[in-house]
Amino acid sequence: MNPFEERKKRQTELQSSVAGIKNIIAVCSGKGGVGKSTVAANLAVSLAKSGCKVGLADADVYGPSLPTLFGVDKAEILAHKEGERDLMIPLEKYGIKLMSIGFLVDVSSPLMWRGPMASNALTQLIGDTLWGELDYLILDMPPGTGDIQLTLVQTFHPGGALFVCTPQQLAVSDVRRAVNMFSNDNLQVNILGLVENMAYFTPKELPENKYYIFGKNGGKNLAEELNIDFLGQIPVSCSLSDANEEGVPLACKEDSPDADAFFELAEKIIEKTKE
């Protein structure tokens, strides 16, 4: 088999792994530290609680967060033989199929991989996983606008991209570049909208008060500037921080009003992806 035929065969294999997925949604940010993984994890849980079949792939190769957010740091991934291919069986927790590079490497050691190596690893991570039939596969994308993002988009053709930013102007500027990349004529990914994380802080003892500790409405103003949908604000809360530390996504907790923003986001994503 010549190299062209091998590449064509490999592309066919990768596409077959995601053939049963109705919607692939890329959760993106222009920079790290804006809570993209937290949003992706709680969006996935919220979609699952809405009755959807959901998978979540942690594609942030240099900083995988999914094992910590779901409390599965020591997970072992099993293999499944399908014809000539060895496929990985995703971990299942809280009704979600999970896969992360953090399940396969020592997360305490730095991954000193160049761009092409990281891109190939993530392509295998997503394309060699036995996802089965899903309504949504959420891709927790790495921050930035480089080789990894290009490879994943061109290989798996997500049906939509959701952007996460914080109110600060630095984060807003980085997201502007990321949105422009995904909407570029060469990629043409449908922009579902933008959500502003860490938008404000409300103390428990003053539930009517909002303190805009990182600035005000930076994400909302950017959405208006770019003519994309603004999908809401997620506040800073101690309960969200505690949930991340516990390894139990906040959306899993029935009695947490702070999780309402994630359920509202899930409802908007469902509405936007209706066939």
Image: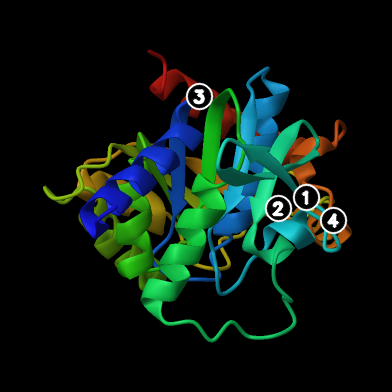
Q: Which mark is residue 71?
A: 4
Q: Which residue is mark 2?
A: 202
Q: Residue at x 50, y 60 (%)?
A: 122
Residue 20's label in the rendered image is 3
The location of residue 24, given as percent across then percent down, is 45, 36
> Which residue is under mark 1?
206
Q: What is the quadrant of residue 145 in the picture? A: bottom left
The secondary element bearing badge 2 is classed as loop
Contact, CB < 8 Å: mark 2 with mark 4? no
The label nearer to you, 2 versus 3, is 3
Residue ID at (85%, 56%): 71
The secondary element bearing badge 4 is classed as loop
Three-letter amino acid code of the residue under disc 2: Thr
Closer mark to the observer between disc 3 and disc 1: 3
**Within 10 angstroms of label 3, few (less than 14), some, or many (20 or more) residues?**
some
- In the rendered image, residue 233, in percent from the top left (x then y), is placed at 53, 45
Q: Nearer the viewer's eye, disc 1 or disc 2?
A: 2
Q: Residue at x 84, y 49 (%)?
A: 248
How many neighbours does mark 2 have within 10 angstroms: few (below 14), some (14-19), or many (20 or more)? Answer: some
C-alpha separation, residue under disc 2 versus residue under disc 3: 42 Å
Q: Badges 1 and 2: C-beta atoms under 8 Å apart? A: yes
158 w.r.t. 274: above or below: below
- Identified by mark 4, the residue type is Gly
State the residue at coordinates (75%, 82%). Answer: 108
